[in-house]
Image: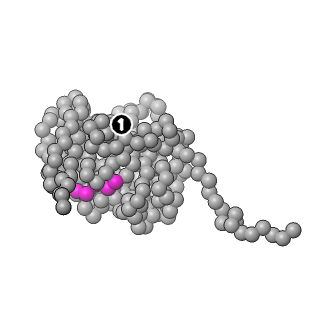
Amino acid sequence: MKTFWKISVFFFVCGFLEPCASATAVKRRPRFPINSVPNGENELCPKVRIGQDDLPGFDLISQFQVDKAASRRAIQRIVGSTALQVAYKLGTNVDFRIPTRHLYPGGLPEEYSFLTTFRMTGSTLEKHWSIWQIQDSSGKEQVGVKINGQTKSVAFSYKGLDGSLQSAAFSNLPSLFDSQWHKIMIGVERSSATLFVDCNRIESLPIKPRGQINVDGFAVLGKLVDNPQVSVPFELQWMLIHCDPLRPSRETCHELPVRITVSPLDHLPLPPR
């Protein structure tokens, strides 16, 4: 039987945030060294807010060079939630990671939002995985958004002041696990995290004071919680880190297909006339 070598695709940002990419056929995923000059900007988001619409956002698909991976046929470019949307099918054979120092040299801001449009199919619907995660130099999670197919929940995890990993878990989300396109957004404020699913506000949970992240690790996409070196297959259309924690409340979901919810009453027999 032929042995198929996994392709590890490592995308990193060079000086002045110009993207570089390398693809190497290897049997095991190596830990790549940081071999470019970090960005000199220490602040990801401005301290003074002129207005909500003036705050910047950072497109993770561009930062991770997902589109370039599709051009190199390392992953597949597919039709997204509508015929006008472009999405990407990420597989188990691709490892997307960027040195954290190149993206967030001063760490993450105290307040921000995470937004993504994605789809899970097949076995991924039952997995416990991180759609986005920041690891320290030893590969341990510091910040992330986790999706749990076993408990039908979403969790925002973060590093506490004492260095321990804390989590705000949003439970009872069975509609998220139906093989359809969904948009999840988490607004991270000073003392709370608020989840939106398909532009519907789900819940706001308290979070503890957060510690600074170690920027000597990596930011990664689509990893198993139990084994963060293993990639999880999923389809990605949009992913953004935005400096406004209230951005999710202003988002629309016009790009998502209209869903028809069937009521249990629809299955009852009609009363006799």
Under mark 1, the amino acid is Phe
- Residue 161: percent from the left, percent from the top? 28, 56
Q: Can residue 63 be seen in this view?
A: no
Q: Residue at x 55, y 46 (%)?
A: 257
Is 21 within the magenta?
A: no
Q: Can residue 122 be seen in this view?
A: yes
Of 272 and 108, the residue lying toward us = 272
Is 230 within the magenta?
A: yes
Left or right: where does residue 18 sit relative to residue 111? left
Q: Which residues lie in the magenta part? A: 229-233
- Other-residue count near label 1 (Cα within 10 Å), few / some / many at <14 / 14–19 / ≥20: some
Instruction: Please state, as top left, top right, bottom left or bottom right, where the C terminus lies in the image.
Output: bottom right
Of 261 and 195, the residue lying toward us = 261
Q: What is the quadrant of residue 50 in the picture?
A: top left
Secondary element at image label 1: strand
Instruction: Please state, as top left, top right, bottom left or bottom right, where the N terminus lies in the image.
Output: bottom left
Name the residue tied to disc 1.
Answer: 58
Outermost residue to the front: 1
- Residue 48: percent from the left, percent from the top? 38, 32
Of 25 and 170, the residue lying toward us = 25
Say if 203 sits above or below 236 in the image.
below
Q: Which residue is drawn at 48% across and 49% down?
A: 181
- Residue 51: percent from the left, percent from the top? 46, 31
